[in-house]
Image (cartoon, rainbow, N blue to C red):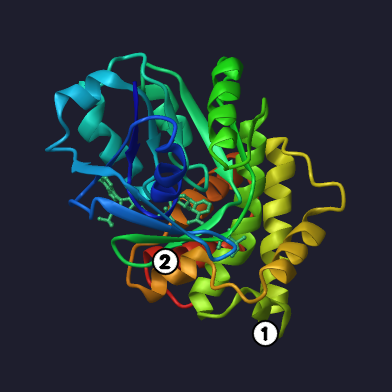
Amino acid sequence: MSTLILGPGAVGRLLALHLTDNAPVTLIGRRPLPRRQTLITPVGETLSREIESVTAATLPDRLVERADIVHLTTKAYAAEGAFEAIAPRLAPNTPLVLWQNGYGVQQPISAAWTGPVLCASTTEGVYLDGDARVVHAGRGQTVIGDLAGRHTELAGRIAARLSAAGLAASAVDDIRVRLWRKLAVNAAINPLVARFRIRNGQLRDRPFRPMVDAAIAEVAAIMTAEGIAAPEDGWPSLVWSVVSATANNRASMLQDVLAGRPTEHAAILGPLLEAARHHGLDTPTLSALHAGFTERMPL
Ligand SMILES: NC(=O)C1=CN([C@@H]2O[C@H](COP(=O)(O)OP(=O)(O)OC[C@H]3O[C@@H](n4cnc5c(N)ncnc54)[C@H](OP(=O)(O)O)[C@@H]3O)[C@@H](O)[C@H]2O)C=CC1
Ligand SMILES: CC(C)(CO)C(=O)C(=O)O
């Protein structure tokens, strides 16, 4: 049996380099990658492995036939298109794990795919350094579950496989809540730091602090309406503690903007705005941030 990893970016290669010692792994990307891939661990050690890399067009039948799991590790905006390119060739009961941030692809792909669809939410921190190196900047935790709570045992097996490979993971029965909570924090931080091209910690200063507070208030109202319980100390405390803990970070959305790549604003702000519309809530701050990404309007 073998593992297919669709989307050979930072998360995809982190998984590949950890899982390859226990089972054959293939990376599927948009272009061939060097076979020899190197991981820089959080303590600065290097670990190199030979990993087969193909594209959807060159993916051989022998690998599709043997695949017992697909990890989908593209950005949210690319996930559905990437999966559609290989889905017709997979056995219809092949388990799929979605690693995207936000809540943009989890529902449509869960509804469309015939096999079990698990969602992963991770706090691992990882980035690419060229085509042959991936830097594991910070260890995190991954939680895995499916939206309907029908595949708990499978989620447990996948989490155990990841943990055995060195990536701490556990199965959960409330993955929807976990994804929304992460989205809530990302929505209060990422669009603002990307819009103003600042590090996370600068949000604590004027003129940004009131903007974060306004975003948090809107996010909190949406979470309440969606039935997502607030964290014990409240949303402001959670968001400001993440800002402090990541003060020196250039958040992922800012890195995308600086690199001229598309951002994941639709997967992060989109579901919040849709929920706000559904519940009749006003979202001037989140709407202006969303419009800034989609229409290039001033905030
Ligand atoms: N990096 C991190 O620390 C964390 C990331 N996440 C989430 O994980 C997801 C992946 O992030 P990350 O790994 O950083 O993103 P990257 O941009 O590093 O990787 C995405 C990969 O997907 C590839 N890709 C795009 N389209 C296709 C396609 N049609 N077929 C196959 N491959 C494709 C890209 O290829 P190409 O090089 O050709 O563009 C790239 O290799 C995101 O949703 C992110 O928010 C969550 C927590 C932490
Ligand atoms: C929490 C935060 C904002 C840390 O930078 C993050 O998850 C990201 O960069 O996407």
Q: Is residue 82 left or right of residue 203?
A: left
Which residue is most to the bottom?
A: 206
Tell me the tag on residue 293: 2
Q: Position of residue 188 (x, y in %)?
A: 64, 62
User: Seen in the image, is 228 located left or right of residue 42?
Assistant: right
Residue 81, picture quadrant: top left
- The reply to whether callout 1 and callout 2 are in contact (CB within 8 Å) is no
In the image shown, does 22 or 129 lie closer to the viewer? 22
Can residue 56 be seen in this snapshot? yes
Judge by depth and name the residue closer to the eye, 57 or 222: 57
Under circle 1, the secondary element is loop
Q: Residue at x 64, y 45 (%)?
A: 141
Q: Residue furthest right?
A: 233
Percent x, y for residue 263?
Answer: 40, 61
Percent from the top left, x then y, of residue 50? 30, 47
Relative to 296, does residue 67 appear above or below in the rendering?
Answer: above
Three-letter amino acid code at disc 1? Pro
Q: Quadrant of the N terminus?
A: top left
Depth check, front residue: 199 or 15: 15
* Total number of numbered discs in the rendering: 2
Q: Which mark is residue 41?
A: none
Say what amino acid the circle numbered 2 marks. Phe
Q: Dot 1, crowdedness within 10 Å: few (<14), some or many (≥20)?
A: few
- Image quarter where ligand 2 lies: bottom right
Q: Decide: is 210 above or below 142.
A: below
Which secondary structure lies at badge 2? helix
Residue at 52% from the left image edge and 33% from the top image edge: 119
Is residue 85 toward the left or the right of residue 182 in the image? left
Mark 2 Cβ and ligand 2 under 8 Å apart: no
Q: Which labelled disc corresponds to residue 207?
A: 1
